[in-house]
Amino acid sequence: MEQVKVIVRTADQTRKAEVEMERSNTSADVMQAAVDNWALPTDTDYSLVNVSTGQVLAPTQQLAKGAVEDGNILEVQPVLVAG
């Protein structure tokens, strides 16, 4: 299995980790790992943004070449719901 090394951080940049993941992982896998490892609120929806490219990764999107490259910064951002 091919792997990719990325930096995952929270939108407020208080938490950050350099991780190596299988390219078969999805954006949802990355977000769930961040919620679990960093005890982020579970009643919030999140999106994953590749800050290096400015692209929002769909939850089902894999960390494929072209979408995510070594050294990219992936940011877990809360989805704000207007009320």
Image (tube, helix red, strand yellow):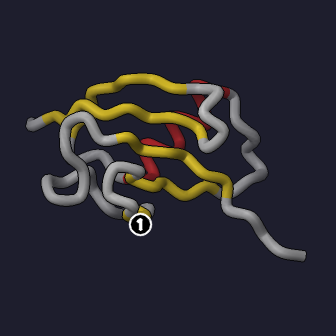
Q: Residues within 10 Å of mark 1 (few under 14, many from 20)?
A: few
Nearest the eye: 76 or 21: 76
Q: Where is residue 54 in the image (x, y as percent from the top left)?
A: 39, 61
Q: Hey, which residue is sitting farthest left in the picture?
A: 1
The residue that appears at 73% across and 44% down in the rendered structure is: 42
The residue that appears at 49% across and 45% down in the rendered structure is: 75
Q: Work out which quarter of the rendered image holds the C terminus and state it.
A: bottom right
Rendered position, 57 above or below 75: below
Q: Quadrant location of residue 19? A: top left
Query: Relative to 51, is 83 on the left or the right?
Result: right
Query: Relative to 1, is 15 on the left or the right?
Result: right
Nearest the eye: 36 or 74: 74
The residue that appears at 9% across and 36% down in the rendered structure is: 1
Q: Quadrant location of residue 41? A: top right
Q: Position of residue 43 (x, y in %)?
A: 78, 51
Nearest the eye: 36 or 18: 18
Q: Where is residue 79 in the image (x, y as percent from the top left)?
A: 67, 62
The residue labelled by disc 1 is 58
Rendered position, 22 above or below 82: above
Q: Quadrant location of residue 80? A: bottom right
The residue that appears at 22% across and 37% down in the rendered structure is: 22
